[in-house]
């Protein structure tokens, strides 16, 4: 059974309610048909019911039995408006603005997750990452003790015995351009949780990456990774994390032993935390293209409840897989 098949199976066992705010989007509707048939999740679509069902019929998607919620007609619309106003009034929110924003499916979806009417949210097939994240950060917010959101990719590298039999988690590859040392430490913890919950890696091993290994180079960029490693070890003493490592020292046992002989982590890492977004984004795409790796994600980490952002170029299968991952983490 492949990792994605395992994730779908876990989702079926949990059978969580996942809200999909882009209710008239063609790929989303086709994905919903499979989600219902295979009982991967209980999807809820947002939009005008007549328009959603008409679009489904037009694209040949059988969505019979799926719940469709029109924000303007929902019995809890007024309750959502009031809660959102109270939540944001110190930031200049007015009752009128709250009414307007709660008609936006992305805001309404985040409030459904916040109030427990849905267990998670998946969007982004037609909306930008910023549009998806903005209401989620305002309403659902980051998890306690977490200050920044990160985007991880599960990398499945063929014919590879590094990492966890060729499976690794890379972060941050999608969200925070120039993280602080504190945020890098948070990414380490969040990425280990992703490895545990989605990849079945019971004992994640985290490497904090740099162009230096254990003081082989001196630079303020190296200092940030060293500080991040210290923070991660202090905040989460149970976490297997070390650095700073060059990539080969993190992954290859012989190189790890040679460059960082005192480290229990060097050469054994299956979770890699990159020093900034440039490195992370470039790194995962190089591995994907040059090694023929499967890159699953981005998986948004650090939210108080699961929200995931799709690529606007996503396929129907991508949506199904992201919904499954969201359900597993709910």
Image (cartoon, grey):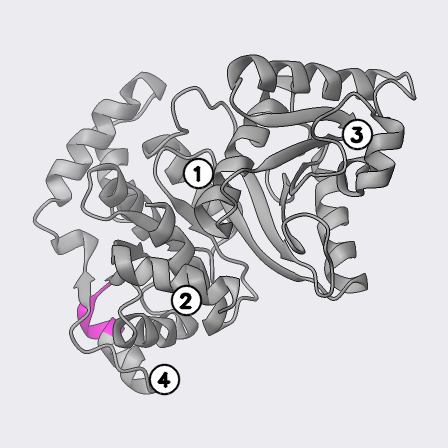
Q: Which residue is mark 2?
A: 320
Look at the magenta stretch and give its main secondary structure.
helix
Picture coordinates of residue 266 (x, y %)? 75, 32
Q: Is residue 115 left or right of residue 9?
A: left
Please report whichever mark, 3 or 4, sits nearer to the chain's N-terminal start: 4
Q: Residues within 10 Å of mark 4 (few under 14, many from 20)?
A: few
Picture coordinates of residue 13 (x, y %)? 27, 59
Q: Residues within 10 Å of mark 2 (few under 14, many from 20)?
A: many
Q: Which structural element holds mark 1?
A: helix
Please report whichever mark, 2 or 1, sits nearer to the chain's N-terminal start: 1
Rendered image quadrant of residue 89: top left
Q: From the viewer's perspective, is the residue at label 2 or at label 3 nearer? A: 3
Q: Which structural element holds mark 4?
A: helix
Q: Are marks 4 and 1 in contact (CB under 8 Å)?
A: no
Q: Which residues are magenta?
A: 47-52
Q: Which residue is mark 1?
A: 134
Q: Which residue is mark 4?
A: 59
Q: Which structural element holds mark 2?
A: helix
Q: Are marks 4 and 2 in contact (CB under 8 Å)?
A: no
Find the distance from the CA under tag 3 to the CA under tag 1.
34 Å
307 or 289: which is nearer to us? Answer: 289
Q: Which residue is mark 3?
A: 245
Q: Is residue 266 above or below residue 160?
A: above
Please report whichever mark, 3 or 1, sits nearer to the chain's N-terminal start: 1
Q: From the viewer's perspective, is the residue at label 2 or at label 1 nearer? A: 2
As for residue 38 lying within the magenta part, the answer is no
Please report whichever mark, 2 or 3, sits nearer to the chain's N-terminal start: 3
Q: Is residue 220 above or below residue 316?
A: above
200 or 297: which is nearer to us? Answer: 200
Picture coordinates of residue 31 (x, y %)? 38, 72
Q: Is residue 170 left or right of residue 148?
A: right
């Amino acid at each position: 059974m492949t990792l994605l098949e395992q994730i779908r199976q876990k989702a079926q066992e949990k059978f969580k309610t996942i809200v999909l705010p882009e209710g008239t989007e063609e790929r989303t509707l086709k994905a919903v048909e499979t989600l219902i048939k295979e009982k991967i999740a209980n999807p809820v679509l947002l939009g005008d019911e007549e328009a959603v069902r008409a679009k489904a019929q037009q694209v040949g998607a059988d969505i019979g039995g799926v719940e469709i919620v029109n924000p303007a007609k929902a019995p809890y619309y007024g309750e959502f408006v009031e809660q959102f106003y109270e939540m944001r009034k110190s930031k200049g929110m007015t009752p009128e603005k709250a009414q307007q924003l709660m008609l936006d499916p992305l805001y309404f979806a985040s409030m459904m997750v916040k109030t427990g009417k849905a267990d998670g949210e998946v969007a982004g097939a037609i909306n930008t990452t910023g549009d998806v994240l903005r209401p989620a950060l305002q309403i659902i917010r980051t998890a306690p003790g977490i200050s920044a959101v990160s985007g991880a990719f599960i990398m499945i590298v063929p014919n590879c015995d590094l990492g966890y039999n060729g499976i690794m988690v890379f972060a941050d590859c999608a969200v925070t351009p120039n993280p602080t040392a504190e945020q890098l430490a948070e990414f380490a913890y969040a990425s280990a949780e992703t490895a545990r919950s989605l990849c079945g890696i019971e004992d994640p091993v985290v490497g904090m990456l740099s162009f230096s290994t254990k003081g082989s180079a001196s630079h303020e960029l190296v200092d940030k990774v060293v500080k991040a490693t210290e923070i991660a070890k202090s905040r989460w003493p149970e976490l297997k994390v070390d650095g700073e490592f060059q990539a080969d020292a993190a992954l290859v046992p012989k190189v790890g032993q040679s460059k960082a002989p005192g480290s229990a982590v060097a050469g054994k890492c299956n979770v890699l935390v990159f020093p900034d977004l440039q490195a992370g984004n470039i790194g995962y795409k190089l591995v994907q293209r040059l090694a023929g790796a499967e890159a699953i994600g981005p998986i948004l980490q650090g939210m108080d409840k699961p929200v995931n952002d799709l690529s606007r170029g996503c396929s129907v299968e991508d949506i199904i897989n992201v919904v499954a991952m969201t359900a597993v983490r709910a």
